Amino acid sequence: MAALSPPVARVSTLELFFDLVFVFAVTQLTAALANRLTWVGAAEVVLMLAIVMWMYSAYAWLTNAMIPNSLGRRALMLVGMAGFLIMAQAVPAAFASTGWAFGVGYFVANAVHTGLFALTGGSRMVRAFRTLAPLNLVSATIILVGGFTPGGWRWGLWLVAVLIQRASPYIDPVDRFIISPSHFVERHGLIIIVALGESLVVIGQGAHGAELNLSLVVVGVLGLSIAYLMWWIYFGGDDERAESALAAVEPRQRARAAFNAYGWAYVGLLLGIVAVAAGIKNAVGHASGHLELPQATLLAAGLAVYLLSDVAFRLVLHIGPVRFRAAAAVAVLATIPAGIALGLAQLTALVAVLIGMLYLEDRAAGGGGRPDDCGPEKS
């Protein structure tokens, strides 16, 4: 996490390169969910996403305070990227034969993160990080040990590690940390864009080996439309308003608001993207047929999670109305029977719900396309 240091204005190309490795992990999680669509499989994906997302966020806070512009810093960033790559490679069998690799990759990424803080920030940064660093080390060690343990032990240890991670900012308050709103919001926005791009890649993966016919083309276009509308939901103004909201918060309180919005709600946004991408992949594979109940549920539930997470994001930062998005989260669940009857029907219904939601928001805003032009919604 970023410490008391001069703010950084823009995201560097090295950070974007780093994010591509993280998105490879997201791609692996999507494939794992699509291939093992059970309650246990879904729980495994959620747990791994929480672990990986925590360390990604840690690097986002780090580069918010430290510019990776020297040979040593760039070399260490490469090592950190290697840690993420190892984790991503281990995802498919992380709860079976490759748990040790997942643990090793996470430990390496954590060690580099802590080292960069210690080496580049001086005594002031070390003081701000003095409790979080040991807590991060404890959780990383638990994940490493868990990777070498069997079955239930791995589950238990990794869950304990996640609980420690999520509790650590309250054990060692983040109020002593300061962030640059422009860099922070841009960095997290880029990961949403890249993750949504990954959801388009799965359209091609789902269609691999299938005959290109009208049904497949229509499903592909509908999948693209859903991804586009998910982009619109967030980038139709939430990112800009989030930056303004964070900038308006008193610096000592800004880190707390940033953690609540980007440390909690963002996990839900990424989880929603992963679930929708896996659902679209399954739908493409059944372009002219029906979906099974788990497949139709995944598609609808993923979009509901995405919408509700955006609702939470808006509520934390007080950046706009939420009633239409909350209602849409319920409405998308009503499309599950349509998917069981015909996959194309559910995809069409989901597109209709999202378009209707955006239309109603625009109409409520007076047609200006900015629902909060008159300030945050009070109700």
Image: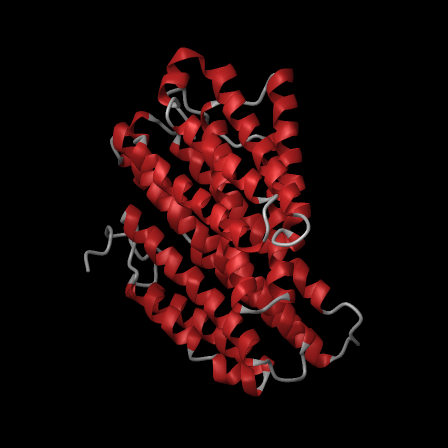
Residue 363 appears in the picture as rendered: no
233 left or right, relative to 311: right
Q: Residue at x 54, y 49 (%)?
A: 154
Q: Nearer the viewer, residue 37 or 303?
A: 37
Determine the image quadrant of residue 37.
Answer: bottom right
Residue 301 in the image: state x and y as whole percent.
46, 69
The answer, for residue 318, to whether it is visible in the render is yes
Image coords of residue 284 (percent x, y) = 66, 72
Query: How many numbered discs sit on the rendered protein?
Result: 0
Image quadrant containing the N terminus: top left
Most foreground residue, 366 or 242: 242
- Above or below: residue 248 compared with residue 215: above
**Corner quadrant of residue 304:** bottom left
Q: Residue furthest left?
A: 378
Front residue of 349/276: it is: 276
Taking the image as shown, residue 110 lies to the left or right of residue 85, namely left
Residue sticking out furthest to the top: 123
Q: Residue at x 53, y 63 (%)?
A: 42
Asked if 189 appears above or below 18 in the picture, the reply is below
Q: Is residue 40 left or right of residue 101?
A: left
Q: Which residue is drawn at the image coordinates 42% and 80% (left, top)? A: 334
